[in-house]
Image: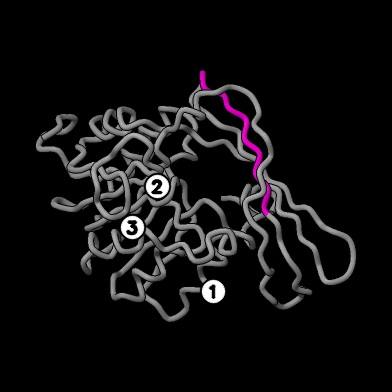
Amino acid sequence: MLDAHTDPFAPIARFYDLDLEGFNDDLGLYMELVGGRDVLELGCGTGRVAVPLAAAGSRVTGVDISPAMLAAARERAEGLPLRLVEGDMRTLDLGEPFGAVLVPLGGLQHMTTTAEVAAALATVARHLAPGGQAVVDVEAPHPDDWLPGPRPVLQHWTRELPHEPGSQGGTVTKLVAVEGRPVESLREVTYHFDVQPPEGPLQRVTQQFTLRIITAGEIELAARLAGLHVAAWHGDYDGAPPREGDDRLIAVLEHAAEPGVAA
């Protein structure tokens, strides 16, 4: 298991909720899908999805590889029917089925090889109960994803830093740098969080990670290998079919009639 020294998300976990402040566009989709069923969320982070589902009455198990993210989720989940597990979505085996399995908001894109994508969807299949449904949400590929080399650094936002014990407050500015590696279907992403306290010098927190550009064909093939099939494709959280220029690519998965064969 990871610790504070090996957890790649530990430096930026405190900024995660600030980064996604106000974003709940996908919650309606998951609320409708879950319908009170037991839920497994892979890549649950700080509980942005898992906590509202648990608050609505579902029994939820959230899994994440980052202890720092899970620590934040535990604070949010106090008193709710939410179990949090440190684990790797490539190898996880809880030995129990769930009526719904979710991989929200690009979580699958942290799988940097086709083998890892296939392993993650095998985990989905292993935990999906007969008759259950899974949802995988990734960024829809865009033409810029296939351009090699670095892109200009972009400022995404500046926000007030929440007052917490030991914190002076101040502001945080998020800057993002991306370098494309299209031959490998990868992007190297660097986040810079510039923290300006009320007094004293600016402090920069930097974290780099690799994201995979995942196509519909790759999801479909990995699903078939896992004994799943794509029951529906969506291009947004309202259920519209995918179209060119969409930001999201959402697959609803079910067990195939026979392993490895699409229904």
Instruction: Report the residue marked by disc 1.
Output: 75
Query: Compared with residue 162, is residue 204 higher up or lower down, i.e. above or below?
Result: above
Which amino acid does the dot numbered 2 rest on? Leu
Q: Position of residue 61 (x, y in %)?
A: 37, 62
Q: Helix, strand or loop at disc 1?
A: helix
Specify the quadrant of the image occupied by residue 81: bottom left
Which amino acid does the dot numbered 3 rest on? Leu
Instruction: Specify few, some or many for label 2: CA neighbours under 10 Å numbering under 14, 14-19, or 20 or more.
Output: some
Task: Kindly report the distance in space between the C-alpha atoms of the residues bearing marks 1 and 3.
Answer: 19 Å
Specify the quadrant of the image occupied by residue 223: top left
Mark 3 or mark 2, which has the lower sequence index? 3
Instruction: Report the residue marked by disc 2.
Output: 92
Find residue 40 and name its label.
3
The residue drawn where x is 30% and y is 28% is: 217
Q: Viewer-nearest of labels 3 and 2?
A: 3
Which amino acid does the dot numbered 1 rest on? Glu
Q: Are marks 1 and 3 in contact (CB under 8 Å)?
A: no
Q: Are marks 3 and 2 in contact (CB under 8 Å)?
A: no
Region in magenta = 174-183
Q: Position of residue 156 (x, y in %)?
A: 62, 51
Task: Kindly report the distance in space between the C-alpha atoms of the residues bearing marks 3 and 2.
Answer: 11 Å
On whether residue 20 falls in the magenta region, the answer is no
Of all residues shown, which one is farthest toward the right?
200
On whether residue 178 falls in the magenta region, the answer is yes
Query: Compared with residue 227, is residue 180 higher up or lower down, i.e. above or below?
Result: above
Counting labels gives 3
Q: Helix, strand or loop at disc 3?
A: strand
Q: Position of residue 29 (x, y in %)?
A: 29, 59
Q: Viewer-nearest of labels 1 and 2?
A: 1
Observer-nearest of 92 and 11: 11
